[in-house]
Image: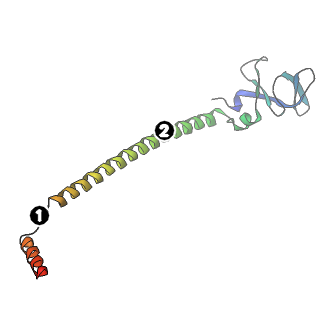
């Protein structure tokens, strides 16, 4: 991962010249570079020599870690976050699977209860009691 310690800060682009170059300044020092937009940062790679000039957006420069140690910490945190995302996805899938199993079990239990209610036979004597009540109604 890139970090600010890898670069020498040359300045910030402050103007666009009519010849197509961008004017960058750092204090009283100034220079010209091809490309970029006003507000972009102009840097040189420390190990890259005089031709290794880069233009980085202001947002990217601000977000860039200051040194290698910080860059490593950010990479580790990023990996941890990815691992957590994977674990969360697995957990959500497992929950959905268990909810589906629960629905099936409830439906099966409900069907079983309905079938057993149909199979129930009246208690002994209930038929006789029914007939007696029917005959009394006729009288």
Side (left or right) of 55 relative to 16: left
Between 31 and 112, the one lying in front of the other is: 112
- Residue drawn 14% across and 80% down? 137
Between 102 and 79, the one lying in front of the other is: 102
Label 2, label 1: how far apart the Cα atoms are = 59 Å
Q: Residues within 10 Å of mark 1 (few under 14, many from 20)?
A: few
Residue at mark 1? 121
| Element assignment for label 2 | helix
Side (left or right) of 95 relative to 110: right
- Residue drawn 29% across and 54% down? 106
| Element assignment for label 1 | loop
Where residue 1 sits in the image (x, y, percent)?
62, 29
Q: Is residue 122 above or below residue 77?
A: below
Q: Residue furthest bottom?
A: 139
Q: Residues within 10 Å of mark 2 (few under 14, many from 20)?
A: few
Report the disc number at residue 83.
2
Q: Is residue 135 above or below residue 56?
A: below
């Amino acid at each position: 991962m890139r970090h600010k310690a890898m670069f020498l800060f040359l300045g910030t682009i402050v103007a666009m010249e009519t010849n197509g170059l961008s004017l960058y300044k750092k204090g009283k020092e100034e220079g010209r570079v091809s490309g970029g937009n006003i507000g972009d940062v102009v840097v040189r790679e420390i190990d890259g020599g005089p031709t290794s000039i880069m233009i980085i957006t202001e947002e990217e420069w601000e977000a860039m870690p200051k040194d290698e140690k910080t860059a490593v910490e950010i990479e580790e945190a990023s990996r941890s976050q990815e691992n957590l995302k994977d674990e969360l996805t697995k957990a959500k899938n497992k929950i959905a699977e268990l909810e589906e199993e629960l629905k099936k079990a409830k439906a099966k239990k409900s069907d079983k209860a309905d079938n057993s209610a149909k199979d129930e036979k009246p208690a002994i004597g209930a038929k006789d009691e029914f007939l007696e009540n029917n005959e009394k109604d006729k009288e």
